[in-house]
Image (cartoon, helix red, strand yellow):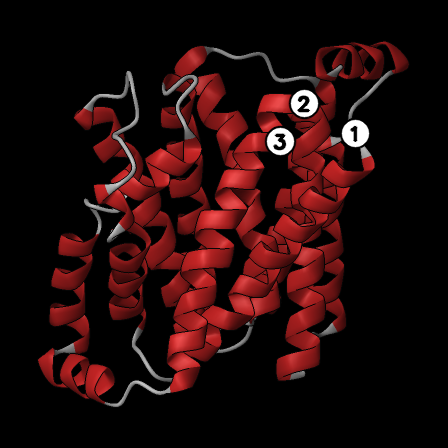
Amino acid sequence: MQFKHVLLALTIALFWGGNFIVVKLGMEEVPPFLLLVLRFVFSTFPLIFFIPKPKNLSWSLMSGIALTMGVGKFSLVFLSIHLGLATGLASLLLQTHVLFTIILSKIIYKSPVSQRQALGMIISFIGIGAIAIEIGGEANLAGFICVMCSALFWAASNILFRKAKNVDAFSLVIWMGLIPPLPLLALSFYFEGSDAIIYSLSNFTYIGVLALAFIVIAATWIGTTLWAHLFKIYDASIVAPYALLIPVFGISLSWLVFDERYTVTTMFGCALVFTGLVINQWVSGKKEIEQNLKKAA
């Protein structure tokens, strides 16, 4: 990978890792479902009037992606942080969508699972089990369950993305934002209440504005578009491993900003999850590396 593209990949990982911290700061002013409503509204309008709808993408498929990713994935990961799950831990556990994607691909498409992938999944799931046993408090356990369900929804959206071939990522991000706001607003009214919505919107400070701006511009527009751009230039096996840096940045920044600390057992579980993810995404063999570089050339 060229040096400028390495810098792009590192920047994206930093944006997405830092996004967990920004989300937590944003939720100090706005409840999670309402924050998501604002995220999708402002990531869609007014750009939707200038960006054409993705070509060769049906409304049904786009709705499926929007509901699994926009409503399922994001609402649950936001809720996990709101419930008190450490942001660094959430950033790591969410990456298990890689493992769930492999499992779903095996079930739906009968995709082969290599011994390396199987080993990686076993190691990661042992780590997840260790974290689940060690994690303390009902709120944290609920947050843990939410983030794991969020990873499963992300995996489902990955399966749907597989059907949406050669679709412009930026256009998809803009147009899919039309779908989540209404169901998310319904969830906000039901769980958070109209009083909380009115109070949050009427007491919105510059911290909330900056947090929302980062979520929309850096994490959504820039991050998603550049990530898709790298996948168009290089093979997935070259780009995907950089996603492993997301929890590295997430855990590091959460320690710096929120002074989050973990027990030895939790750290050991995190190490197992990360090791399993590395094994799953690591390019194996000189021949495979040469083939991927040839595709990227």
Question: Against 149, is 163 above or below?
Answer: above
Mark 1 in CB contact with mark 2 (< 8 angstroms): yes
Residue 279, quarter of the rendered image: top right
In the rendered structure, find residue 56 and report the number of the disc placed on it. none
Q: Name the amino acid type tagged 3.
A: Leu
Circle 2 — which element?
loop
Identity of the residue drawn at 22% across and 49% down? 180
Vertical placement of 228 versus 220: above or below?
Answer: above
Mark 1 → mark 2, Cα distance in angstroms: 8 Å
| Residue placed under numbered mark 2 in the picture | 234
> Is residue 50 shown left or right of residue 7?
left
Reading the image, the residue beneath label 1 is 1
70 relative to 251 in the view: left or right? left
Q: Residue at x 47, y 11 (%)?
A: 110
**Hey, what amino acid is under mark 1?**
Met
Q: Position of residue 15 (x, y in %)?
A: 59, 57
The quadrant of the image that shows the N terminus is top right
Q: Which residue is mark 3?
A: 230
Residue at 60% from the left image edge and 52% from the top image edge: 128
| Residue 238 falls in image quadrant | top right
